[in-house]
Amino acid sequence: MDLKAYLEERRALVNRALEAYLPRVRGPAFRVVEAMHYSLMAGGKRLRPILCLAAAEAVEGNPQEALPVACALEMIHTYSLIHDDLPAMDDDDLRRGRPTCHKQYDEATAILAGDGLLTEAFRLLGALASHFQDREAVLLEIIELVGAAAGYQGMVGGQMLDLQAEGRKITLKELETIHRLKTGALLTVSLRAGALVGGGSRVDVAHLTGFGEKFGLAFQITDDLLDVEGQASDMGKEPGMDARRQKATYPAILGPEQARQWARRLVEEAVEELEGFGDQAQPLREIARYLLVRRS
Ligand code: GRG
């Protein structure tokens, strides 16, 4: 399959839907809507929504039906980036090739833009009841799973551990816990939610969850490697920030070659989770292998 064309087509689909879900309607609080829009539409790979749609497809569901859920996940991801970039956290100036939200606007507006995107994501999910009609239990399950993955049991918890680990030597096991929560949880729930919307069986959902867990870890290892070896022009942010902040990373702990090898093994294991799936899971297999050669 032509993965590049597939990703471009899906990215365009997601971008059109996000524009529709977050219209720049002028109102009393227009500044915050503008800041939300600024960060949400600043580019980005749209990996989480694409995984969500691909998981729906893998279980022979209609990816279009998963589109609102996919967009809610991208809103949550964008909120996390806005808050992560704040001076109180990573204090970054550049994100997705543009000034970070607090640089473009101001700190208070960036906090509110993140809050606005997180809240809007759950409003959007709640508004889907009519789409799910006789499957409302599935929608409630998705809302609960997304809440757990984004909150203290997932991304927020991982971010807390990450901040507490700064300037301290940590073990490989601790690093894995941080990343399983900080980035893995939202990636995994993207696949799980897509499989649930697509009507997958419990066994299918479990395999796609397993795929997500391995994919999530491999994604983080390749992200760490990009920070060492990548180019700012490809990534839309400065490389070398992890080393400058003395952050524990996979290449720092294992060495780049062993880190790369581990990412390769995780990708193989992720693809093995899809053994029982047919051709309709091919995009997921290809996206997983693409992790190993990605430049952004
Ligand atoms: C503030 C609650 C809170 C959480 C922040 C995700 C996160 C937690 C911080 C981001 C820090 C970071 C750079 C982590 C490395 C992996 C990662 C999530 C990279 C950014 O995701 P991509 O590569 O970004 O999917 P795009 O811009 O393509 O969407």
Image (cartoon, rainbow, N blue to C red):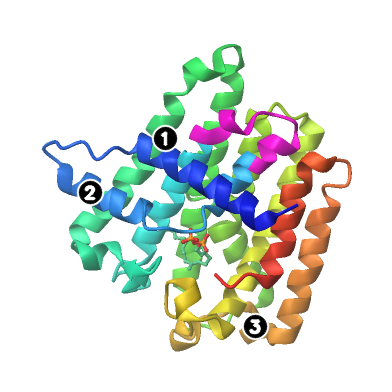
Q: Nearer the viewer, residue 23 or 207?
A: 23
User: Residue 170, how many percent across, how many down?
Assistant: 59, 79
What's the distance in space between the residues labelled 3 and 1, CA to CA?
36 Å
Q: Are marks 2 and 3 in contact (CB under 8 Å)?
A: no
Sequence-first disc among 1 and 2: 2
- Residue 89, visible in the rendered structure: no
> Residue extending furthest left?
28
Is 61 colored magenta in this rendering? yes
- Residue 233, visible in the rendered structure: yes
129 relative position to 64: left or right: left
Q: In this view, does 184 lie above or below 97?
A: above
Q: Which mark, by number, is residue 251?
A: 3
The residue carrying pointer 1 sits among few (fewer than 14), some (14 to 19) or many (20 or more) residues within 10 Å by Cα, namely some
105 relative position to 121: left or right: left
Name the residue: 68% across, 55% down. Answer: 3
The residue carrying pointer 2 sits among few (fewer than 14), some (14 to 19) or many (20 or more) residues within 10 Å by Cα, namely some
140 relative position to 106: left or right: right
What's the distance in space between the residues labelled 1 and 2, CA to CA?
19 Å
User: Residue 211, how many percent across, how many down?
Assistant: 74, 51
User: Residue 266, how many percent across, how many down?
Assistant: 77, 64
Start-end of magenta stretch: 54-68
Q: Mark 2 points at which residue?
A: 34
